[in-house]
Structures are given as C-alpha cells and as structure tokens.
Image: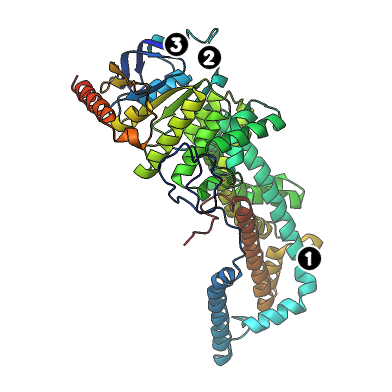
Amino acid sequence: MIARLQKVDKVYANGVVALRGLDLDVGEGEFLSLLGPSGCGKSTVLRLVAGLGEVSGGRIEWPGAGAGLSRGDIGFVFQDPTLMPWATVFKNVLLPLKLRGVAPDEAEARVREAIEMVGLEGFERAHPRELSGGMKMRVSIARALVTHPRLLLMDEPFASLDEITRFKLDNDLRALWARQRWTVVFVTHSVYESVYLSTRIAVMTARPGRTSSEVAIDAQAPRDEAFRTSPLYNEYCRDVSARLAEAIRA
Amino acid sequence: MRGGERMASVPSVGSKVSDVRAVPEVLPPRPRRLHVWGAVGRALPPIVIGGATLAVWELVVRLNQVPSYILPGPLLILTTLVRDWGTLYPSLLVTLAITGAALLVATVAGVAIAILFTQSKLIELSLFPYAVILQVTPVVAIAPLIIIWVKNIPLALLICAWIVAFFPIVSNTTLGLNSADHNLLDLFQLYGASRRQVFWHLRLPSAMPYFLGGLRISGGLALIGAVVAEFVAGTGGAQSGLAYRVLESGYTMQIPRMFAALFMITCTGVLIFLLLTGLSHLVLRTWHESAVRREG
C-alpha cells in the first residue's frame, strides 16, 4: 500500500464541507479511479494527497513509502492542461526538472523520453496555442511523467475532450500504465471511463464525500476496443452504475 | 501514447497501443510568413483619411484666405518646419530626452514597486493609495512646486513626467503579477519551487502582457508629462524643449512655427506608441492572443 486516508474531513474556509470521514487505501501499482457525482470532493481528495491542502480532520498515512512519499514522487495532471502559454512543449515538460535543478543533459534526455512516451515527437518547439486540446493534455501528462513519479494523480484529465479523442487517450494511458505500472489515482465522473481504465473503483457519495463502495475490475483481457464492447465490460458498467446511483441517494 | 492527431507523417511509435484510428487534431507548426500586404492594408486607411483631411484643410485656408496667424495651411506648416528645423530639432531632442528618461525611470521604478506590492498584501494595501494619489493629482498643479523645490530644471521636468507615467506600469504590472494561473501555482508548489523560481518562471511571464499594455500607455503619458512640465517651467535658452517653442511662437505670433512644433510633438507621441507596440508584438508574438494572427 502506498497511501492510506483515514476518516479524512475537509471543510473549506467558506464553510463548505467537502469530505466527511473518507476512508481510502491506495495500493502500490494499482489504477484506482475515484468515481462520484460533480462536487462530491473527488478533486479535493487528490489535492490533499498531493499536499496542496490540509486535512481538517483524520489523517493521510504513507505506509509503503518509508519516511514518506516525497513531492518528487508525485505527478499531477489537472482537469485543464495548465500549460505555460509562453513556453514551448519542450520547456513545459522540462519545468519540473528545471525547478529541481536537474542537470541540463539529464533533463533533456528525460524530457525527450517523456515527449516520446506521449507521442509528441516533432512538436517540441510548438507553443500550446498551436496544439489541439488532446495534444495539450498529452503535454500535461508528459510533464507529470518526466519526474518518473511513483504516484500519478489525474483530476478528470480528459473531461473536456471530445469522445473520440478521449477514447484514444484512455487507450494510450491504459497502455502506458500497463507498461510502467506506476500507481495512478484517476478522478472521473464517467462510469465507462472508470471501468475501462481501472483495476479498482472507489465510488463516492454526494457532498460531503466519502467512499460508499469499491469495485475491483478483475478483467485480465487487454483493455482495447474489444473489451469496450464485451459482456464483461457491460456487466461491470451496470454494477458500477447501480452503486453510483445508490451512493448519490445515500 | 501516440501523436496520431497530426496530419503530417507521424512516426509509428505508439501505433501498437491504440486501437482508435488517428483523428487529425491539429496541423504541424507552419513556418511564419511576413504579412506585408496585411500591414499595408492596415496602414492605408488612416493614411488616406489623414491625406484627405490635410487636403481639405489646405483648400479651406486658401479659398477663404484665412490669415496664417489664425490658421496656417499644412503646406506653410511644412515649409516652416523645414526652415526652422535648426531651432526645432534641438528642442525635439530635449523633449525626447526628458520623455525617454521619465519612461525609463517609470519602468524600472514601476516594476520594482509592483514587485514590492506582490510580496505582501500589507505592503500593497499600505502604499497603493499613495500611488493613486500621485496619479490623480494634476501634474500641472504640482509642477510649479516641484520646479521650486528642485533647482535643477531638467531633473524637475523628469520628476513631473515620471509622476504622470509611472502609475499605469505599477497598476498593470501588479495586476499581471497577481494573475498567474492558480493551477500553475499549485504545480510549482507541488514541485517544491522557491519564491524566486515562482517569480521568474511564472509570475513574471504571466505579467508580461499586462506590463507591456501599461508601458504603451505610459509612453504617451511620459511625453504629455514632459510637455506639461515644460509649459509650467517655461525655460528658454539651449535647454528648451518643444513646449517652450510652442509658447515662444505664441508670444511672437509665429503661428505656423507653433503648429510645426505641435506637429513634432504629435509625431513623437505616435512614434513612441508605434515603437512600444512593436516591442509588445515582438515579445508576445509567439504566444499571446493579442499578438498572434488568427488562422483561417
């Protein structure tokens, strides 16, 4: 296990209770999706795990990380690409390494590796405005991967994309994860996306959010278009949808 | 992952990992072209309107036989400008020197003050009202005091012009430095960036369009401040600027010369604006919506 959230509460300064008594374990190497209705606190969970906010109650432990997972071990992909518009693709991906003072030669090699991983070779010198939404998101993912993170946090990264691009990025992300096996915590409000990508799904209640149930997606077959149309996939989608409906009612 | 969105030939790096066929999302970056005809097309309408106005002006003056001490025609103003160039040109250099120095000091001080403001909300709240007070106090009202207090006239003029010019830079740059994307700020925090790194790699580039917008306004204001201060100071001799030439021409009823000096002030203002617009375009041309050509 890489992280354990125990009875976590989060109350914002304006009095909004985002989370109440949330329990969640994140296993090493798993692809965990947080599924829930809009505003249920999914993004808040990611921000707390990333250290971008303080818990109001409860605790976050890092049992599998020795003295604690350092910030260098975490990659974060926001809902928007969140790129620096004045910087090229190369410089955007380079940013985390630059901030950490990684030697230029090593940094360049790692940036090229990350750019190749997301299939953007040839676009190193392009500016974000020259890219499509899907490509911007690829840059954002490359930036998160360039540090070789142990834990990758993704906050509805494909929510604003059209369905075709989204399917393609889902395929590619899943294939990358299958090769690299980082731990991924993926926030989504799409049942279909969560079933397709995940090894486990944590279903959250409406605000104040907490986990209401968990589903292990135990599908050994490769996640591809055949899986998307398989009875097993449909069965999981039906099960998760029912759990989500129940969580919303709870 | 793969770059299958590209229209051009794509290395098949990730073709094994994706089953959805490539959908063109974007064209590869194209080499930039000079849009000469576009620039000519933009410049032509104001030139035509300006030329037509001057022609009508000349015609009205000639047909009505308007005396030159009331309203000289454009041709007379032009010949006066050429004839008196020896007197007017040094004055232009004086005004330009004050304007340039005031703009330089306004830029350096304005950016420094804006950075100071962003270091602490308390500092901003404490000092910003005084910046506003300086801005809203008419320079023509305080220029006599400054000229009395500061014995060195060029320095007094510089201070007056600076007071007028510095506020847009302070105000815009402060706004820009505070406008950095919050998600990017989170990202910098996540990657353990120092305050200095956040400033250099995020806040400063984010503020650049705002700063350049302020600089364009301040360029014109520095000239206005210099001219107003020269009017108040009314200094003669070798160190007189264009405003003094306007005053002097009024006193001696050399109205065509007055118009020639006014024309030079106007041209200087336009030139400053064009230069600063060019600078802004140069800095922002690759990424900011204000400077990038729309496709299609």
Q: Position of residue B242 (x, y in %)?
A: 70, 65
**Relative vertical location of residue B250 with respect to residue B192 in this rendering, above or below:** below
Q: Position of residue A191 (x, y in %)?
A: 29, 30
Please say whether residue B133 is visible from this viewpoint. no
| SS at mark 3 in the image | loop
Q: Which residue is mark 1?
A: B90
Q: Is residue A240 left or right of residue A129?
A: left
Amino acid type of disc 2?
A: Leu
Amino acid type of disc 3?
A: Met
Q: Is residue A15 left or right of residue B265?
A: left
Q: Give the tally of numbered discs.
A: 3
Please identify, in this view, whether the residue under mark 2 or under mark 1 is nearer the observer.
Answer: 2
Residue A170 quadrant: top left
The outermost residue toward the bottom is: B63
**Relative vertical location of residue A13 with respect to residue B227 in this rendering, above or below:** above
The crowding category of the residue bearing disc 2, from other C-alpha atoms within 10 Å (few below 14, some 14 to 19, many at least 20), is: some
Mark 2 falls within which chain? A
Amino acid type of disc 1?
A: Pro
**Relative vertical location of residue B142 with respect to residue A116 in this rendering, above or below:** below
Could you give the CA–CA distance between mark 1 and mark 3, rounded to whole angstroms? 79 Å
* Of the image marks 3 and 2, the number of the one nearer the N terminus: 3
Badges 2 and 1, same chain = no
Q: Which residue is mark 3?
A: A1
Q: Is residue B227 left or right of residue B22?
A: right
Q: Are marks 1 and 3 in contact (CB under 8 Å)?
A: no
Please say whether residue A123 is visible from this viewpoint. yes
| SS at mark 1 in the image | helix
| Viewer-side residue, A36 vs A87 | A36
| SS at mark 2 in the image | loop
Could you give the CA–CA distance between mark 2 and mark 1, rounded to whole angstroms? 69 Å
The crowding category of the residue bearing disc 1, from other C-alpha atoms within 10 Å (few below 14, some 14 to 19, many at least 20), is: some
